[in-house]
Amino acid sequence: MPRSAAAGSYTTTAVALHWLVALGVFGAFSLGLYMHELPLSPTKLKLYSYHKWAGVTIFLLALIRLAWRATHPAPPLPDHMPRWQRMAANATHHLLYVLIVAIPLTGWLMSSAKGFQTVWFGVLPLPDLLDKNKDLGDTLALVHKTLNLSMAALVSAHVGAALKHHLVDRDDVLARMLPFVNNKKVAQ
Amino acid sequence: MIRTTAVALASLIFAGATASGTASAAEVGPVQIDQSRVAFVSKQMGVPIDGEFRKFSAQLSFDPAKPEAGRARIDIDMASIDAGSAEANEEVVGKNWFNARQFPTAGFVSTGVRPLGGGKFEVAGTLTIRDKTREVLAPFTMTAQAASVQFDGSFVINRADFGIGQGVWADFDTVANEVQINFKLVAAAKK
């Protein structure tokens, strides 16, 4: 039986997109942390390319997610949540949506300003949105890094809150976003 | 002050004399280095990367009426390379790439020019990079402006032919073998 928001659950598409983006973000973030300290080598050039390909992929998935979310409302938060938690949850979700678009975008702009075109999977060239400009490239690198650290903090809060809902509140907030878990409300 | 001016004047006259000396047999004047460019496009992981050499010298002698008599010589200061980023610049002057300490200059010396028709020509010559010399052919165009003549051309070399990119860089899956060389040489128009 397909899930639907009306039944108090996320759609299968929303769940799939959530976890694809989560996987992509985790991978690209870790790779970004690791690669940028490496001395120049063929491996470093390869990792940078993989990171950029992942970033473009996340950017596209994020746009699809936003479009899906706009047309498929999320299920309501549980009734027991106090007002401040609802506000915190909404703010975190909105900021995360902003960041999964803004972070790849700043990476793309940075690459452009540093004089390296982004060629998706080494095949599809993306337009360079900026002319080569070292100072602008350095600024965008700082913006990219700052946004990433902000995202890491928000993701920690997001994961922590989901676990708290599951382990302490014992509600279905985490379960309804898990794939392959048959949501009770849907089953009823 | 007067001495400085005199020295400056003397060096100007000397520079003028050398330049006109090298171009005396030509229908074009001395090469205007500040408007000329020796650039290249390499490919990393399928991404074209622009680079150039900031210091080079060039001597040209060319008469479009007698292209066969044309001659060109370009000497490039390898340490002046801009390979697209500070990190790359540091790497490519090293032993695996140009080894600029041991081979500080690269050069092109023409062996012949032939007309291709329609304002196009082809120069043949030898290109020496590191300790390797190879024959190359470069098609080029000539465009006459009011006070200058511009030569534009490009050709492709295989970096492996010159031993550029050794050791860990020797295979072509990150940095492609083919490198496109683009040149723009502007010379004063001869009256």
Image (cartoon, coloured by chain):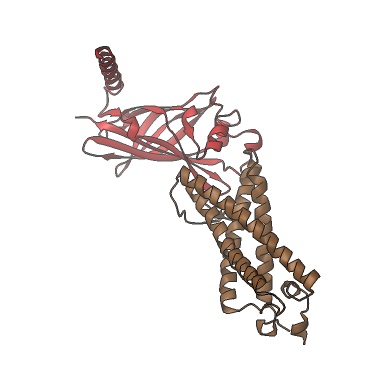
| Residue at the image point whose x is 53% and y is 37% from the top | B86
How far across and down, in percent of the image, does residue B150 sit?
Answer: 30, 37
Q: Nearer the viewer, residue B52 or A23?
A: A23
| In this rendering, position of residue B189 left or right of residue B80 | left
Question: Measured from the top left, where is residue A74 in percent x and y?
Answer: 64, 77
The single residue placed furthest to the left in the displayed view is B191
Query: Quick one: quadrant of the N terminus of chain A?
Result: bottom right
Residue at horizontal 79 percent and vertical 74 percent from the top: A170
Left or right of B154? Residue B68 is left
Placement of the C terminus of chain A among the 4 image quadrants: bottom right
Q: With respect to residue A49, does B181 lie above or below? A: above
Chain letter for red? B
- Relative to residue B169, is residue A105 depicted above or below? below
Q: Nearer the viewer, residue A178 or B123?
A: A178
Of A121 and B152, nearer the camera is A121
In this rendering, the answer to whether B15 lies above or below A176 is above
Chain A as rendered: colour = brown
B7 or A186: which is nearer to us? A186
Residue placed at 47% from the left, 56% from the top? Answer: A127
